Image (tube, rainbow, N blue to C red):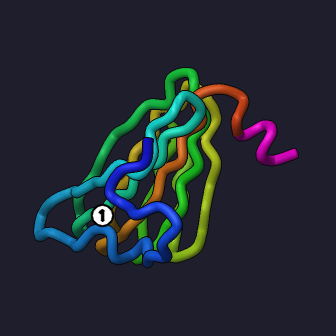
Amino acid sequence: MYENVDINKQFFLKDLLNYKKNEIDSKKILDSKTCKIVFFAFSKNKELELFNENEETMIIIVDGVAKLTIKDQVHILTESESIILTKYQLYTLYGIEKFKAILITKKNDWFQSFLI
């Protein structure tokens, strides 16, 4: 279920991945029936296009500055800023500067029970 982290041990999220020049790197932390958590490290000027199918996704910027584009809406996100994307969204993450982000994707009504 959990990957790349030790359970019941503290860790710094920022330290899970190092920046790699001209790359986007990722590590899966959790993949369960209800939730998927993936940590990303983007080099400056790198871009990734993603699509939320039947899922909602929360993006949390852990370090750096990212540009998130959803249709024609542009959001500049910096360290500790977050956004929740609804289902069926095509979106793009772009590194204005190098940045690290965690993407938490619900696979059913997990967010609903979490937010109540």
Q: Is disc 1 surrounded by few (<14), some (14 to 19) or many (20+) residues within 10 Å?
A: many
Residue that appears at 46% across and 32% down: 90
Spot the residue most to the right. Answer: 116
Task: Give left or right: position of 34 versus 115.
Answer: left
Spot the residue most to the top. Answer: 54
Q: Secondary structure at mark 1?
A: strand
Residue 6 location, x and y as percent?
Answer: 40, 63
The type of residue carrying mark 1 is: Ala
Residue that appears at 43% across and 78% down: 12
Q: Is residue 6 above or below residue 71?
A: below
The residue at which mark 1 appears reads as 41
Residue that appears at 22% across and 56% down: 24
Is 115 colored magenta in this rendering? yes
Q: Nearer the viewer, residue 10 or 113?
A: 10
Quarter of the view holding residue 63: bottom left
Residue 38 location, x and y as percent?
Answer: 41, 50
Residue 1 location, x and y as percent?
Answer: 44, 41
Quarter of the view holding residue 54: top right
Q: Nearer the viewer, residue 88 or 54?
A: 54
Magenta stretch bounds: 111-116
Q: Is residue 70 above or below residue 11?
A: above
Residue that appears at 56% across and 47% down: 73
